[in-house]
Image (cartoon, rainbow, N blue to C red):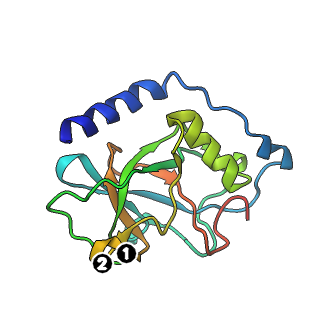
Amino acid sequence: MKRMKQAAALAIALGLALVPLSASTAQAAGPATHKGMTWQTLATGPEGTVQVGGFAHSTSSDPYNGDTLPSVSLPVLCINVDGSPAPDGISIDFYTGWAGGTVALSQPVKGSRLNSQAAANSICQASFGIGWRQAEFHDGRYGPNLEYIGGWSFWAYGNIAPNARFWTAINDQQANPWN
């Protein structure tokens, strides 16, 4: 399982340079003008896992109003939820859930290109393929059989540089570039 995840991460990294960002039909609505929420890499863990989030005091993430102007270019945090079980050695709770899949970063894009959830998702699909979408604040799960939804950060498989910053969605606040 570990080798499969490493091979997938390497394939993603190599393919990323070859996949152009495609324009979305959703972009016809015009550029996004709202600040968007960003997260960063918080930690690395066992078996090729990474914790991403806005939980640490040093992240300057604002899930209520957005924290980064849409004129800034950052990668989109993309996720493919495939039901992968959490490896041993990760502490899972409300604030640090398990996403059950793999995360990766797109090429940097201006927040103004993220004028809808569909536009953000299309960047992930163009970069990594079907099944990928923009990661969301509440993607972490915890509890028995991971039945509860958490927030603020989550663990997933992936290879993201320490302190990397990226666009992340939130589904219940006005903190996305398209809001």
Q: Residue at x 84, y 48 (%)?
A: 30
What secondary structure is marked by label 1? loop
- x and y, in percent, of residue 70 in the image: 68, 53
Closer-to-camera residue (54/127): 127
Viewer-closest of 35 and 103: 103
Q: Vertically, is 130 above or below 86?
A: above
Q: Residue 105 placed where, x, y %?
A: 46, 42
Tag 2 near tag 1, CB within 8 Å: yes
Residue in the picture at 33% in, 45% down? 158
Along the horizontal axis of the image, is 43 left or right of 63?
Answer: left
Hey, what amino acid is under mark 2? Gly
Q: Residue at x 35, y 45 (%)?
A: 160
In the shown orientation, is residue 10 left or right of residue 20?
A: left
Amino acid found under the numbered disc labelled 1: Glu
Q: CA distance from mark 2 to mark 1?
A: 6 Å
Label 2 element class: loop
Q: Which residue is mark 1?
A: 147
Q: Specify the label residue 143 is tagged with.
A: 2
The residue most toward the right is 29
